[in-house]
Image: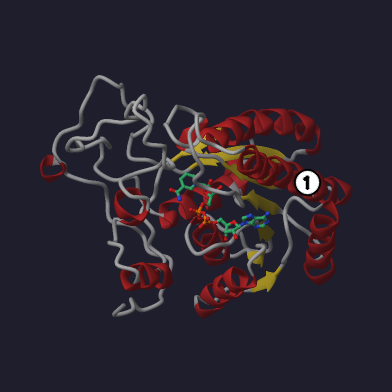
Amino acid sequence: MEVSLAGKVALVTGVGPNIGSGVALALARYGAKVACNDVSDDAIKACIARIERNGGEAMAAPGDVTDEAAVQGYVNDVLARWGRIDILVNNAALLGGRGVLDESAADFERAVRVSALGNFLNTKHVGRAMAERGIKGSIVCISSSNGWSGTPGVVAYAFHKGGVNNFVRAAAMDLAPYGIRVNSFTPTAPNPDNPELLADMARRGLGPGGILVHGRGGGLGGPTGDEPWRRPTRWGGQRNPMVPMGTTGTPTDIGHAVAWLCSDYARLITGTDLVVDGGARAKNFAYTPAAADDLAGPLPLINLDDTPASPG
Ligand SMILES: NC(=O)c1ccc[n+]([C@@H]2O[C@H](COP(=O)([O-])OP(=O)(O)OC[C@H]3O[C@@H](n4cnc5c(N)ncnc54)[C@H](O)[C@@H]3O)[C@@H](O)[C@H]2O)c1
């Protein structure tokens, strides 16, 4: 019994080098042809090259996910080239931001717009393309742990990821009569593992722990002011181990899970959320996991990228 997406066509939005590229590569490695969307042509080119050097087939689907004409345009391009779309992964989003005392109306609005219209317009037009052709497809909306619990410093992100979670349940109800499934996947600060991204991070002096440990100055959350009335938003001392299994995993772990969720084995899974986080979300607030050195750790990662590691 092998999970296979052979014969299926996927569209992934926001194929930047971290999670979007990891999911797109995984769908290709499991056999799907993958259309790669982004507002960045460089991101699209890099993702297509990564898929092709790993033996997959990909095409560009450039455009802004908030622009309905652009969405219709690239959906039509994919249909013209490959005749169908079986899988949609709504991944594009604006990360970061600030807390409720500091966020600007313009940045709040843009972040919510990219998430809200990106998920809605792509689900609408790909959903119609599936329904018209009788394709019992799978739509996956990428959420975040910030959609399920609170973190200081990311108020717009928390707002729109919470919205993604209930959008999924509503869209799942709209599309259930057509046999089309809609689910979310919740990444939890995965450690980047795209060799090109790791090399770029090394050049910029960021460690392999990447985004969680070094990339954003000690964790999620935007800067605050320094007025005398300010209170710290988080514990400033030494960080305890936080993840029961010692790691939240990588975009490759996400890719394996999303590929399975888009496979025919998951035919009745709709309106739900899948999370691969080493137990992070399930953890009770009052419990501190054992020190990393005392954990057995997970099974080894099943790699999907044959790109040799760069000396970076
Ligand atoms: N990185 C994390 O730690 C983390 C954790 C939880 C959830 N997520 C979610 O995973 C997804 C991918 O995260 P990432 O770390 O790879 O982010 P990223 O910023 O590296 O990639 C996002 C991509 O979306 C593209 N994009 C932005 N606006 C767009 C638009 N209007 N139209 C088309 N493309 C657009 C960007 O150009 C970029 O390439 C996002 O939905 C994010 O919220 C990430």
Q: Residue at x 72, y 66 (%)?
A: 61
Confirm if mark 1 falls within 8 A of ligand 1: no
Q: Secondary structure at mark 1?
A: helix
**Number of numbered discs:** 1
Near mark 1 (Cα within 10 A), the count class, few <14, some 14-19 or many ≥20, is: many
Looking at the image, which residue sits at the far top? 286
Measuring from the top left, give residue 10's x and y in whole percent: 67, 59
The answer to whether residue 111 is above or below residue 163 is: below
Q: Say whether residue 271 is visible.
A: no
> What residue lies at 36% left-to-right and 27% top-to-bottom?
230
> Which residue reaches farthest left?
294
Picture coordinates of residue 54 (x, y %)? Answer: 50, 75
Q: Which residue is mark 1?
A: 121
Q: Residue furthest front?
A: 228
**Which amino acid does the dot numbered 1 rest on?**
Leu
Q: Locate residue 183: give its quadrant.
A: top right
Location of the C terminus (image quadrant): bottom left
Q: Is residue 237 left or right of residue 274?
A: left
Name the residue located 42 percent from the left edge and 31 percent from the top edge. 151
Instruction: State left or right for residue 171 relative to residue 310.
Output: right
Looking at the image, which is closer to me, 114 or 195?
114
Which residue is found at the position 59% from the left and 41% from the top? 266
Horizontal and vertical percent position of residue 124: 80, 44
Horizontal and vertical percent position of residue 186: 49, 40
User: Is residue 23 shown to the viewer in this render?
Assistant: yes
> Is residue 26 toward the left or the right of residue 152 in the image?
right
**Colouring of the image:** secondary structure
